[in-house]
Image: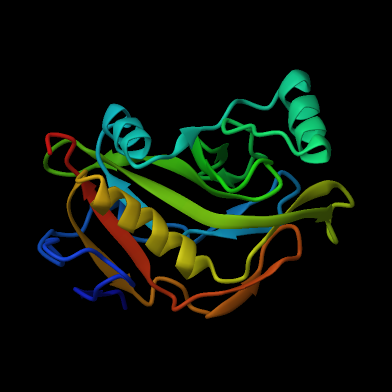
């Protein structure tokens, strides 16, 4: 059974409204994990925002996040070269993961250092269901890429994620709060059945099992 709670995210700035918003209909029986193109379990869903596509992009841009470029031969070559040469690429592409039978609808990142080797990043999928304000839910998987390695499941060169995915979830919410682009947020307790797992690349992760849900307000 899903329970609602108004707990505070780590290091959340004061003065933020919490736990004051009704649940979104897309959260009912929503998926909890993405999948890879080969059908393996991918990254865990750990964050969600309610708002239009325009509002999502505005919020992330104002929060210091960059929209990821699509995967092409050109962008794939560039990210590989920039990792080797240690050159910045704030719009570096992310690999495709799948939810609701399709790849991500949007992806954003925040560079760390002068190379796409390390970065904060998140993928989002837009729900078909909308709330009473005709706003969709954007389910997201936020992780931190800590290095590049050979995948233990696919045999391909890929990023290895840091195991603490809650830290990335909290950072994303806190960035949006600091930018003044959230009306409020709440938690879905026990969103995940298990507190530990592995993603499609075989990287282990752990979580407090909660989903953070924020309501976007770009008028602020």
Picture quadrant where residue 145 is located: bottom right
Q: Residue at x 53, y 79 (%)?
A: 194
Q: Residue at x 29, y 27 (%)?
A: 54
The quarter of the image holding the N terminus is bottom left
In the image, residue 21 above or below residue 220: below
Q: Residue at x 72, y 66 (%)?
A: 203
Residue 105 visible to the viewer: no
User: Left or right of 166: which side holds 2?
Assistant: left
Pick the front one: 207 or 132: 207
Q: Residue furthest top?
A: 74
In the image, residue 211 above or below residue 120: below
Q: Residue at x 62, y 46 (%)?
A: 113
Pick the front one: 170 or 13: 13
Q: Position of residue 160 (x, y in %)?
A: 72, 58
Count numbered badges in the picture.
0
Q: Position of residue 4 (x, y in %)?
A: 22, 73
Q: Residue furthest right?
A: 155
User: Left or right of 27: which side holds 15?
Assistant: left
Residue 132 visible to the viewer: yes
In the image, residue 45 above or below residue 1: above
Q: Position of residue 6 (x, y in %)?
A: 19, 73
The quarter of the image holding the C terminus is top left
Colour approach in the figure: rainbow
User: Left or right of 90: which side holds 219?
Assistant: left
Q: Position of residue 107 (x, y in %)?
A: 51, 37
């Amino acid at each position: 059974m899903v329970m609602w709670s108004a707990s505070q995210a780590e290091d959340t700035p004061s003065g933020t409204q919490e736990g004051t918003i009704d649940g979104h209909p897309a959260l009912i029986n929503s998926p909890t994990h993405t999948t890879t193109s080969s059908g393996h379990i991918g990254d865990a869903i750990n964050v969600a925002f309610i708002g239009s596509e325009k509002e999502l992009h505005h919020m992330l841009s104002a929060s210091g996040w960059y929209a990821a470029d699509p995967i092409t031969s050109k962008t794939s070559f560039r990210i590989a070269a920039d990792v080797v040469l240690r050159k910045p690429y704030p719009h570096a592409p992310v690999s495709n993961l799948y939810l609701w039978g399709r790849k991500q609808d949007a992806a954003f990142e925040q560079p760390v250092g002068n190379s796409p080797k390390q970065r904060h990043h998140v993928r989002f999928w837009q729900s078909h269901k909308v709330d009473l304000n005709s706003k969709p839910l954007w389910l997201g998987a936020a992780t931190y890429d800590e290095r590049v390695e050979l995948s233990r499941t696919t045999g391909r060169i890929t990023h290895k994620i840091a195991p603490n995915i809650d830290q990335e979830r909290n950072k994303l919410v806190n960035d949006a709060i600091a930018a003044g682009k959230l009306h409020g947020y709440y938690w879905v307790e026990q969103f995940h059945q298990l507190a530990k797992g592995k993603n499609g690349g075989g990287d282990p992760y752990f979580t407090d099992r909660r989903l953070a849900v924020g309501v976007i307000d770009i008028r602020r």
